[in-house]
Structure formats: structure tokens, C-alpha cells
Amino acid sequence: MQVKYIKALSIKRMYAERIIDGSKKIELRKRSIGMELGDLILLYETTPDSIIRGGFIADKTISLPVCKMWSKYHHILGVDKDFYDMYFENCEFAYGTFIYESFLFPSISLKQIHESCSNFTPPQATINWRQNWYIQSEWIDALNKGRNQLMQEGRLSEQLSLFALQ
């Protein structure tokens, strides 16, 4: 069984840091990877760090032609033009998930994750967090805060149901 609304995203440390400090406001991908409005996205920083220490509440995801995504949003993508062009080479569309709010959490290493999350495999893109895996109280606080704000703004109508998370 999987915990609704919590996903882990594989990301390089420098991009995770840019999300946390607010200089990267859109997470880019070559295809849609299932981040939904109001999801808590845990940032799994790839090797050599292999750690979760931050996350964000996902806003809407958009798809635009590669050139249009750059021209419209380059100032908040958190990447330089050379990287962007190389990453999206031979792609027609760019997918971007807006960062609604970012968070810094107590760090949890891959070793600690393996000890408290049976069968955890670092994500290739995203993975859904399983109900029997370890969950930090700070993650739940961030999720509740973000979803409640989105509901107050009238952007999210589904009630939060964190069945048996405590």
C-alpha cells in the first residue's frame, strides 16, 4: 500500500539546494512523472550524497514546447541555457512542475532510509512513498500546511486523508 500525496524525486544536490533556497521555482523533466498539485515531493539527492534533506509541495505541472518553456520561464528554472539545451536535446516538449513551497527537513541518509524503509530503492525519477516506510513528523507538517493553503486558495478541494500515518 502506498501513502497518498508523498513521493520521492531523484535530483542532483545543486538543484535540490536551488529549490530549497527559492532560486529554482520549476522542476523540469522530459516527461510527466506524476507529481500532482498538493503532493509532498521529497528530494532524494543522488550520489555521492544519497540523502533526503528537503522537499516541496507540488503546484501545477505544465507542458510546453522546449523553446517556449525557456523563453517564458528561464528566470525561474534554476538551470543555465547550455544545460537546458543539452538536457532537452531531441525533445519536443518540456514538462515543468511549479514549486508551491519548499522545505528543509532533518537529514536522513540512504543507510537510515534502508534501515527504516524495507525494499526502498532510490528512484530513477519519482516513487510513491509506501505506508510502511518511515515518515518524519516534519514531512506531515509540511504536507498539511501546503495542502491546507491550497484548499484555502480554492485550488485544491480534496480533503487530506492521511490514514494511519501516526
Image (cartoon, rainbow, N blue to C red):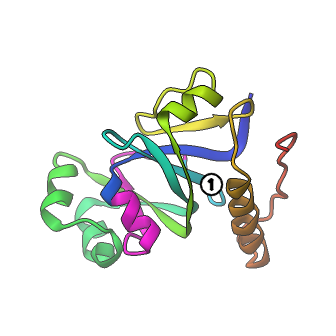
Relative to residue 134, is residue 153 depicted above or below? below
Q: Which residue is mark 1?
A: 40
Q: Position of residue 164 (x, y in %)?
A: 87, 39
- Is residue 21 found inside the magenta-colored segment of the image? yes
Relative to residue 163, is residue 96 depicted above or below? below
Q: Position of residue 111 (x, y in %)?
A: 50, 31
Query: Going by the image, does 153 lie left or right of 55?
Result: right
Give the number of callouts: 1
Crowd rating for badge 1 (residues with CA inside 10 Å; few <14, some 14–19, many 20+): many
Front residue of 148/18: it is 18
Q: Is residue 110 visible?
A: yes
The residue stretch that appears in magenta: 15-34
Residue plotted at (65% across, 46% down):
6
Q: Amino acid at mark 1?
A: Leu
Residue at the far top in the pictured view:
119
Residue plotted at (54% across, 43% down):
8
Q: Secondary structure at mark 1?
A: strand
Query: Going by the image, does 52 lie left or right of 23?
Result: right
Relative to residue 23, is residue 19 depicted above or below? above
Q: Quadrant of the C terminus?
A: top right
Q: Is residue 33 visible?
A: no
Residue plotted at (69% across, 49% down):
136
Relative to residue 162, is residue 146 depicted above or below? below
Front residue of 74/107: it is 107
In the picture, residue 72 is in which quadrant?
bottom left
Q: Position of residue 10 (x, y in %)?
A: 42, 43
Q: Position of residue 21 (x, y in %)?
A: 43, 73
Front residue of 102/47: it is 47
Q: Quadrant of the N terminus?
A: top right
Residue plotted at (67% across, 54% down):
139
